[in-house]
Amino acid sequence: MTTAPVTDEPPAARTATRLTRSGRSRRVPLWLLLPGMLWLLVFFAAPLVYQASTSLQTGSLEEGFRVTWHFATYADALEQYYPQFLRSVGYATAATVLCLVLGYPLAYLIALRAGRWRNLLMVLVIAPFFTSFLIRTLAWKTILSDGGYVVSALRSLHVLGLTDALGITEGHRVLATPLAVVCGLTYNFLPFMILPLYTSLERIDGRVLEAAGDLYARPLTTFRKVTLPLSMPGVVAGTLLTFIPAAGDYINAELLGSADQKMIGNVIQSEFLRVLDYPTAAALSFILMAAILALVTVYLRKAGTEEVTG
Amino acid sequence: MTDTATTGTAVRLTGLSKSYGAFTAVHPLDLAVPAGSFFALLGASGCGKTTTLRMIAGLEEPTSGTVELAGRDVTALPAYKRPVNTVFQSYALFPHLDVHENVAFGLRRRGVKSVRKQVDEMLDLVQLGDLARRHPQQLSGGQQQRVAVARALINHPDVLLLDEPLGALDLKLRRQMQLELKRIQTEVGITFVHVTHDQEEAMTMADTVAVMNAGRVEQLGAPADLYETPRTTFVANFLGTSNILRTDVLDASGTDLVLQAADTKLGLPATRCTAPARAGEKLLLGIRPEKVALTHADDAATVADGRNRVRGRIVQAGFTGVSTQYVVDSPVAPGTGLSVYVQNVERDARLVPGAEVVLHWNPGHGFGLDAAQDIEAGTEATGDTAGTTVGEGAG
């Protein structure tokens, strides 16, 4: 975590190596940075600036757009689409929590209990990536279809009556309801939760867990006092990797939801590609970015940044 | 601690064994550790000593047999219910907790009051009072080791188990910590069971040493007894160095056995021989290098009567400061030669490689061993004392 590395090298020896090191080799790290920095400059920073200028333009497709520093676009966009913003945050939060609840036990099992099955199970976790995101989500459309096995099973078990009452499904069907969208998000982002969780759980020294048992901690206490705190870097990384893309996702809402489940990603997509109102779309993108940044900052303040920087 | 813990037997192992599939890590083992003693399990990597310790701690389930602590059968109890604590080889400190919380862990789990006061006292005992708020990664190896000891000792266990706790330290620090641990043990009076592959460490610290080899206890006793009267070639070679000669028994009727190696007759008091000796059979005769004296062949007449004498020629002389270590070629030890350590008190300038010498020793310093053993057993392992413990996990 935030500890100074312990070196056995005496200070004098270290100074000596620094002095003999040539200026050329000291610049090597900078050269290694260069390709990545260039890439980011061209494909991240430049579009960001372009987007920012777009969001401050006014005009129409026929007359052309011009930068007029029209900040009101932001206020208008927010006012018009705040329900979709809230919905995005809500769905993404629900999906993240579900991913954590489903992913943690699985990652725990794979990392600490699976033994020789460990690699096979990890391949199975990653296996969905072999199929396109779009195809997998379309498959869920079939799975959750009104006449499908899942829905009929849920109907006969009277589960759908309950979920209808809770307002997460409607009219005894799953497709085109919040439940379907959240399920889709959970399914699609689950590996992003499991992988960092697995990595941090797998890194835990088994002897530390033995030591806890040796010091009178029952298995559950060992989990609460040792395993869980030591896996927090994975929890934080996993929730971020799930929440951030889920909040901006539009495929799941598009394919599994209806007009009532539109997330902010759907709005941006349609403003850009259908309505062709580029300033509003750009402004919405920036608002989404700012919102996620703010939420993540608050979250990291609470969780402790050292969990991420490891 | 209960009364039985301070007076009787702290740990009793009965027929305790552990197998992993076809591999037997520990053969059925019977062992009694007296309460209040410093007990060492000594052996090379993979001899089963760590497995034995882990079975006492409850971290490993025995294949057969029972573990009793202070007269109570705890074989079926999980680790967290046993009144023992372990100092792990790699210390296994909790990286997310500071020193204070590491030490407090056991107390908190048992809901003990006045944690703070006890932790402060314990940290003072191991001289870490001013580092209470550091995290383990910020400590040196020796400091981490002391935290590990404090974390275990604070619970006043019936038995403290130490799994190669000094293996990761450099030689100088190791010597210092050995004395430290011995001091703490005397101070708190808790039974210590210490696993180590370092014979010097075992002999320095322990009251009783059990030498383990290939999943069995070869010999058990006080360090001096083990050293002076080893009963197997493994013990003779693993604890220090021994010259072992193949001899024929000429006469086994008197109080002194008469043996013959090459053309040399050698004596050995019958009481110094634990193996059965009958005239006409073979016997191994052991003698420690420091018990052998060297005299130049020209002065052979000055050697006192009644001592065993062997002719030889010096092949090698190594000066180590305190002593000079000679390798002497002799017909009684074909191939290997004899090792002789001579204290550097009055050095004879003639004792250089090539010199003809007489080796002689008091017959009472020799020891007899069963000839049906591998004469080299335990010799490879003694080179291991530098502290390489890689692969010990299975041991």
Image (cartoon, coloured by chain):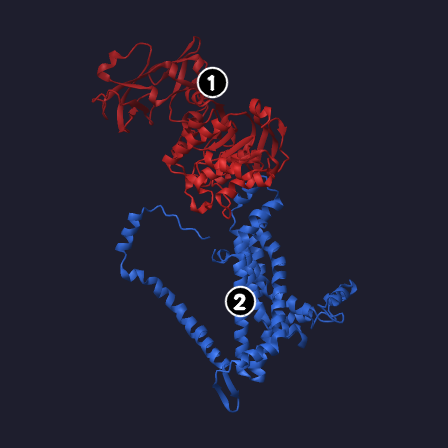
Give me the chain that's red.
B
> Which of the labelled discs sits on residue B275, or is there none?
1
Using the image, name the chain to which the residue with label 2 belongs.
A
B186 in relation to A42, above or below: above
Q: In the rendered image, which quarter is residue B373 located in? A: top left
The tint chain A carries is blue
On screen, residue A143 versus residue B352, left or right, reads: right
On screen, residue B376 versus residue A240, left or right, reads: left
Instruction: List the single residue furthest toward the top.
Output: B254
Q: Which of the pair A183/A283 is nearer the observer?
A: A283
**Residue A175 on image: x %, y %:** 70, 71
What's the distance in space between the residues labelled 1 and 2, CA to CA?
82 Å
**Residue A63 on image: x %, y %:** 51, 91
**Residue B165: in sight, yes or no?**
yes
B221 in relation to A259, above or below: above
Residues under numbered marks 1 and 2 in contact, where contact means CB atoms less than 8 Å apart: no
- Label 2 Cα crowd, 10 Å radius (few <14 / some 14-19 / many 20+): few
> Which of the labelled discs sits on residue B287, or is there none?
none
**Residue B110 on image: x %, y %:** 60, 38
Which residue does the image show at 58% across and 68% down from the upper left? A246
Instruction: List the single residue furthest toward the bottom.
Output: A63
**Residue B211: in sight, yes or no?**
no
> Which of the labelled discs sits on residue A294, or is there none?
2
**Residue B22 on image: x %, y %:** 56, 38
Using the image, name the chain to which the residue with label 1 belongs.
B
On screen, residue A154 versus residue B367, left or right, reads: right
- Secondary structure of the residue carrying tag 2 is helix
Closer to viewer: mark 1 or mark 2: 2
B371 in relation to B100, above or below: above
Q: Amino acid at mark 2?
A: Ala
